Every structure is written in structure tokens, then in C-alpha cells.
Amino acid sequence: MTTTLTAENRERLKSVSTATLTTALFKRGLRNTFIQDVHRIDPSGGNMVGEAYTLRYIPAREDLDTLEGFKDPEHPQRKAVEACPPGHVFVIDSRKDARAASAGNILVTRLMKRGVAGVVTDGGFRDAPEIAALDIPAYHHRPSAPTNLTLHRAVDIDVPIGCGDVPVFPKDIIVGDAEGVVVIPAAMANEVAEEAYEMTAFEDFVAEEVMNGATIVGLYPATKQETHEKFAAWRKAKGR
């Protein structure tokens, strides 16, 4: 079952951290939701939020994967770049192998111009300095200059993949911040967004209390009635 993320909850996910989201998912029994070893090329800017659109690589084979392959308009990598819907996040399974690039500046620029919300690979991007200057969130393991054809063969589009040891299904909700990328199963995306939004309000209250010298005992977690009362007053004062 899939659930469409509401516009309101999409906006909520733009204001919560991946740390808070992983806790909300852990409360639902999901432990493996944070994509391992990927980093935002340019850590500035707001959250990346969108439905997953996937591309899967397998190891390249020398007799098949040559530069001639890119002339075919049905080449899966090229086709995926033109097919990824606006507002989605393009997620690439590069088998955690950054020795060859998953894509480069030209393809990421095309994704940006088509309105794609972001791009994630557990491999590497070539032209990383140029990608850093683009107005699109991009996450990878590390820069990698060689073309993908030297190691990767694109084979599947919009299918379940693994990215950084996390399963990613088409339409799962992908959220990225300066810390990393989390995968939210589509069926629970709305409830997780709503809870994470509430959690963020409480955590902001707690951070303010601790900065003012409060002990975490009875505050975090909130095991004292006084904490709940103070939080309610804080929310009212802050309009949250």
C-alpha cells in the first residue's frame, strides 16, 4: 500500500531533521532508514524532500559498456534523467562503489532544470565542484572523476534498490538535510511527518531549557508533569 504525501506534510518535512525522523521511524520498529556514507556536496540550503525515483547499476562489462552506449536514447541512465518526475528525488544504487562516477554535472543540471527535488547516490559524482554550485541538493560518498561506464552498467529504472545499505522503493519519501538522507516508507510518511513536526517543537523547547541551565532529568524525556505544563506554555507563547 502506498500513501500520497499531503502538501502540508511535505512542508513539515522541510522543517525537521533526519535525526528526528530516524527516531520517529525507530518508534515504529524501523532501524535501517539512514543511508550510510553519503554526504551533501553543498551542505547549505534547506531540506530535500520528495518521492523516490530510482536507478540501479550492476557491474559493467567491457564488451557492452562503451561510450557508444550513450548514443542510444533508451540507455537507462539517460532515459531515467528524462523520466524522473518533477518534485521527486533521483536515487541511484551504485553498489557503494565510488571508484567511478554515478553521474556528472550535465546530467544533474538537467535534473535540476526539470524540477527534480534532489539526487542521491551511494557512489560518487564527477564534476563535484560544478554540482555544488547548482540549485539542487546532491548527496554522494565522495568525488569520482571516471565515467560510470568504467565500472557501472545501468539496468533498471523505478524499481526497488539498495542505496547505502537501505532499501528504497519507488514512491518512498526521501528527506535530506546537512547531516544525511533518510528513507520513509510511503505508507507511513504522513504520520511520521506529523509526529516529527511535533517532536521538533518539543526538542526546540528542551534545547532552550538546557541552554538556560536546566537539567535533563525529568525534562528529556519528559517524565515530570511540570515539563508538560512548561512546554504547553512555551508553545502558546511561540505560536507553535
Image (cartoon, rainbow, N blue to C red):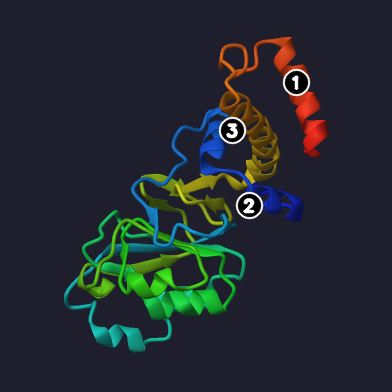
Residue 159: percent from left, percent from top: 47, 59
Residue at 41% in and 46% down:
35
Q: Is residue 67 left or right of residue 226?
A: left
Instruction: Give the distance between the C-alpha atoms of the residues marked 3 and 1, in whole angstroms.
Output: 23 Å
Q: Which residue is mark 3?
A: 24
Mark 3 and mark 1 residues within 8 Å of each other at the beta carbon: no
| CA–CA distance in space, label 3 to label 2 | 15 Å
Q: Quadrant of residue 199?
A: top right
Give amino acid for label 2.
Answer: Lys
Q: Are marks 3 and 2 in contact (CB under 8 Å)?
A: no
Mark 3 is surrounded, within 10 Å at the Cα level, by few (under 14), some (14 to 19) or many (20 or more) other residues, namely many
In the drawing, does residue 122 fall left or right of residue 149? right
Q: Is residue 134 above or below residue 177?
A: below
Which is more foreground, mark 3 or mark 1?
1
Task: Check disc 1 and report the residue beneath it.
Answer: 230
Amino acid on which disc 1 is placed: Lys
Q: Amino acid at mark 3?
A: Ala
Mark 2 sits on what residue? 14
- Which mark sits nearer the N-terminus, 2 or 1? 2
